[in-house]
Amino acid sequence: MTRSSSAEIGLRTSAPGPRRRLGPGRVLAAGFALLLVPGAARPPLAAEGDFVWNTELKEIYSQDVQRIGEGGEDDFITSLTATAELRLRTSRSESVFGYAPELLRYAQFNEFDHLDHHEYGRWLVRPGERSEFQFREGYSLSTRQVGFADLAGAGGGTGQPVTSRAERTVWDAEPRWTFHPRLMHTFSLGALYRSESYGGDGASSGAGFVDSDQFGVQAQYDLPLGRSQTLGGKIKGDRYRFSQDATAIDNGAYDQFFNLGVTWSLRHPGRFELLGSAGAYRASGQGVEDVFKPTADLAGTWQWIRKALRLGYVLGYSSGGGLTTTEQSQSVVLNYNVTSQGGWLLGTSGSTLRRRPLNQDLVAAGTVPVSGGGDTLYGYRLDASIGRLWHTGVSLSATAGYLHQQESSSTGINDLHFLEGSIGLRYAPPAPPPRPDRPST
């Protein structure tokens, strides 16, 4: 290391003086000074915490509240949500714990009244300058689906099919360790456990839902390409376990996956960020023939002064979302949001979901029913929102959306489509002013 301090330069140019040995008395005096004199020894920083909360009341109009397709009835729903979040920080760690219950009251179908629960937690610790450890977990018990990604609190794929009304319980946990062996070189090792179960039978077909458990491990290494790009590779493995009506599905399902892929990223902080990967995976299982399929994903975020655009694309495999076992999945998500100086919020989003069998031989044999386009399921959703936020923490919003989903079955095509709109009033206490930095002395 090259020293550049002027004080150190001055010390080096002066003539060195004779060394003096410290006697026992001076050693004891120095020890008492460290213990008694404020600032002589810096104690570890204590944890700092914030507690934030908000509550929202919404009146919802929804078509086909049973989500059964033809013959579904409409209803008005009153939703009351309260969210509480505890944030803790130390010099080396950050923690977030949140809980958001939602009370749903139906005007006509009183038997559908329910209290949904959503819980989440995130913990990050930095044991050293080169490494960090993260742990995320989430839990969701929900009875209503509006789009293809409704698992608040529990992570999941960007595309989950909409099923007929049921109690859906999801819990997942994801540890991840990140290490930087060199400047801008990153090695990460992570794991995932995810459990998804359904209560009740499908109202549209009378058949039971398919529950699933997922176990996954992934390792990835990225190296720099210039100042803003990285290139790397990843290896990933997933193991699924399926059951239907408390009976394990051990034969005829693809439940083991092995992935190899190349990753790439481009980042310009405050402007845009692009993350992508491409590769292939092998799917296998008992009683089925191994297949090889491509996988790809792309995620992008563009930010302007008061505008944001987000794009996500995923091609790979996923559990059947309660309808079946694993399938080939393809989904696209697009979001655009605008915030004005006067507190107005405008947003629009769109998403698509496509599912296909992993083995096309099953389609030719007539074992798996598909539509004319070769899909077992296809759907899209469009929605728009407008809102107004005041400095007092009160906000008023209105949303409207439309979803269309076609699911192939042995009896034909189940056509699900519905409109849904809501008006909501939300209150979140204004954020307190930032705390001053601690003195360094």
Image (cartoon, grey):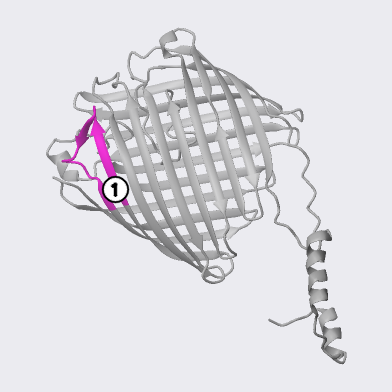
Which residue is most to the left? Answer: 365
The residue where tag 1 is placed is 239
Residue 325 visible at all:
no
Q: Quadrant of the N terminus?
A: bottom right
Q: Is residue 84 above or below residue 278?
A: above
**Looking at this view, is 201 or 121 the one in front?**
121
Left or right side of 404 for 16: right
Secondary structure at numbered mark 1: strand
Mark 1 neighbour density, 10 Å: few (under 14) some (14–19) many (20 or more): some
Q: Position of residue 364 (x, y in %)?
A: 14, 40
Q: How many marks?
A: 1
**Looking at this view, is 441 or 102 the one in front?**
441
In the rendered image, which quarter is residue 100 located in? top right
Task: Identify residue type, mark 1.
Answer: Arg
Q: Position of residue 348 (x, y in %)?
A: 56, 34
Which residue is most to the front? Answer: 24
> At 73% from the left edge and 36% from the top edge, which residue is drawn?
431
**Looking at this view, is 177 or 76 the one in front?**
177
Residue 249 painted magenta? yes
Residue 199 painted magenta? no
> At 51% from the left edge and 29% from the top edge, which residue is drawn?
383
Q: Quadrant of the C terminus?
A: bottom right
> At 53% from the left edge and 40% from the top edge, which residue is drawn?
121
Q: Is residue 249 above or below residue 437?
A: above
Q: Is residue 60 above or below residue 401?
A: above
In the rendered image, which quarter is residue 65 located in? top left
Residue 338 visible at all:
yes
Q: Position of residue 254 (x, y in %)?
A: 22, 45
**Residues shaded magenta:** 238-257
